[in-house]
Image (cartoon, coloured by chain):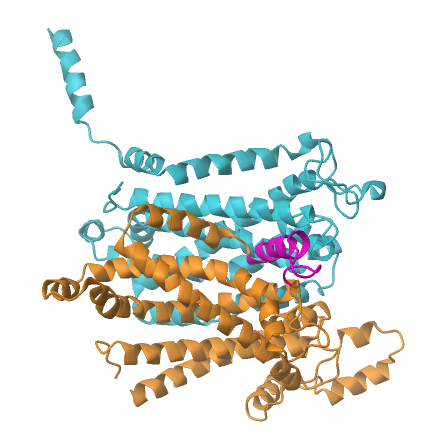
Amino acid sequence: MTEKLSAPETLLSASLQPESLSALIWRRFRRHRFAFSSAVVLLAMVILVIAAPLSGYSATEQNPKNDFAKPSSEHWFGTDELGRDIFTRILYGGQVSLAVGIFSTIFSLSLGIIVGALSGYYGGWIDNILMRITDTFLIVPVVFVLILFSALLRELPGSTEYRNSVWIVIIAISAFAWMWPARIARGLFLVLREKEFVSASRALGASDSRLIFLRILPNSLGPLLVSATLQMAYAIITESGLSYLGFGVQPPTPSWGNILESAQVHVYRAPWLAIFPGLMIFITVMAINFIGDGLRDAFDPYVVHEK
Amino acid sequence: MTTYIIRRILQAIPIMLMLSVFLFGVVRLMPGGPLAQAERNPNVTPEQLAAMRVRLGLDQPLPVQYVKWIKAFILEGDWGYSIKFRRPVADMISERLPATLLLFGVGFLITLLIAIPIGVYSAIKPYSFFDNFITTLSFAGQSVPVYWLGLLLIVIFYLVIQNPFSSGPLFPAGGMYTIGKEGDIFDLIWHLVLPIIAVTASWIAWYSRFLRSSMRDVLNEDYMRTARAKGLPIRMVHFRHGLRNALLPLVTMMALDLPAVFGGAVFIETIFAWPGMGRLFWDAARGRDYPVLLAVVMIEAALILFFNLLADILYGFLDPRIRYD
């Protein structure tokens, strides 16, 4: 008897069961064609970059006899002024550039969320002080200050290994990029702290940190994820730009930016030096921007695809 | 309005001071301070070093040094001497500023001329073929690194495509004038083409997108329905009633973007050897010329603050709904 009933019952409950939020967001994200294909491209890029040791060439070993070789079946993207294979250097450089992008995003987003959460949740004088500091950072001419910082940090005493560390670049970029997520987080916390579910939780005796991290933060996930994609695109472009100007990741460690740096001098002789590293930055940043756009649509319940 | 402006200026002062303390502290506390080069030079005796220290006031406590420096900077316009060129920094900056203002002024104008029609048309016909095409293109524009675009333009228009009338390249790859043609306006325009394309590409992408969404918001307003209902020609509705309101947030947006715009100057001017502030800064950074670096950052920050203030005041004039008191 019970067995007979259970079959239609499960069928019924399966069809009536509401779709989980993450499934809904995933479905909406997948429908955004550009965003979904961008996610695939980005994943392929990550795999390619991790597989760099398979290329068979070294990223740093010089071979002056074979300098400025044109792109060929042996050297897909040609060689640079020291005879190094550009394709290999781009793969290794991608490891550095993507790592800088990921870690800068983690640092700047975390700092921004903390500042924004304190500001939006507590309000009052805390909000006032934190927002004045944020305003000050927002008027800083970032590229100039980053170059100044980078120039100064390299004058520090100590081993060159420490001075030329990629972490310096990551920290410098994060230190001047947390303001945008901070403003977004503040706005979200200002609105959400007044919501009923927060009041209910507070009435049950939840502490401030519990309300901030376990109640409000998870509900701000969508806009903060979108902000993370913007941070990552910004970090990758900034790292490459700084390295391109000679103030970011220092040779011989390759990064997409400092491969381009040598292109600045040799572009007239070897145009391929200029084309390929920049193309990788461009593709990666565009993919991240499309993913951000897809996430924005997927998290926004009001977006209707008018197609 | 006047009280508002005064209050805003009073608010700007602590921000500027905070920034100056920060910059001064960073430059002075670092071991590679103003005397780093002299310290490394084996020909400079310790006595000479001590004398230099006294002459530059470096023997005094840091707060005293700071007050002296900021006083001279603001009140006397004394921005220090370049270590490398042994010239007043103020002179160097006043030589370089016009080139930057020219490049970015023209760039801004062209951006508006192209971005406004694109944004309006995309907003009026959303999800049309044109709009979708522009959307995709603007993602490319927002993602392209300005330094790479500059290099690509040099490859395409200097190396590959040749001028059909002479044997030379189609556009010059750098500088402001051809040597011997200084002051020739046509030569200047010829030199401006590539840097302008490089700077405006991403601006056009950002601003046309921004204007599209701002225009779409305005199109849903009640007063737009009223304007249409009373039988105004649709063009008039869109441009007189719609665009004017949609352009308002763009003013604030542009002011907020200024730090990024100045940052872009470093790249563009480096790639195209444009004799502006960005190029000056890059050269100074490579030569560790700290007085120049400090002065340029201070001036840029002051300009950014000034334009932000100007944007807020302008906003009050453009939008009568906003009342400052």
User: Does A24 sit above or below residue B117?
Assistant: above
Residue B11: image location, x then y, percent: 39, 81
Supply the letter of whichever chain is cyan.
A
The N terminus of chain A lies in which quarter of the figure? top left
Left or right, residue A177 beside residue A71 = left
Supply the letter of whichever chain is orange.
B
Q: Looking at the image, which is closer to me, A63 or A212?
A: A63
Residue A222: image location, x then y, percent: 33, 47
Q: Residue at x 55, y 58 (%)?
A: B146
Q: Is residue B244 magenta?
A: no
User: Does A101 sit above or below residue A36?
Assistant: below
Residue B201: image location, x then y, percent: 49, 58
Q: Is residue A279 visible?
A: yes
**Extent of the magenta region:** B146-171
Please state the total of marks drawn on the protein image: 0
Q: Is residue B168 magenta?
A: yes
Q: Looking at the image, which is closer to me, B64 or B70?
A: B70
Q: Residue at x 49, y 68 (%)?
A: B107
Left or right, residue B271 beside residue B223 = right
- Quarter where residue B222 is shown: bottom left
User: Does B260 sit above or below residue A188?
Assistant: below
Q: Residue furthest right?
A: B43
Q: Looking at the image, which is closer to me, A62 or A227?
A: A62
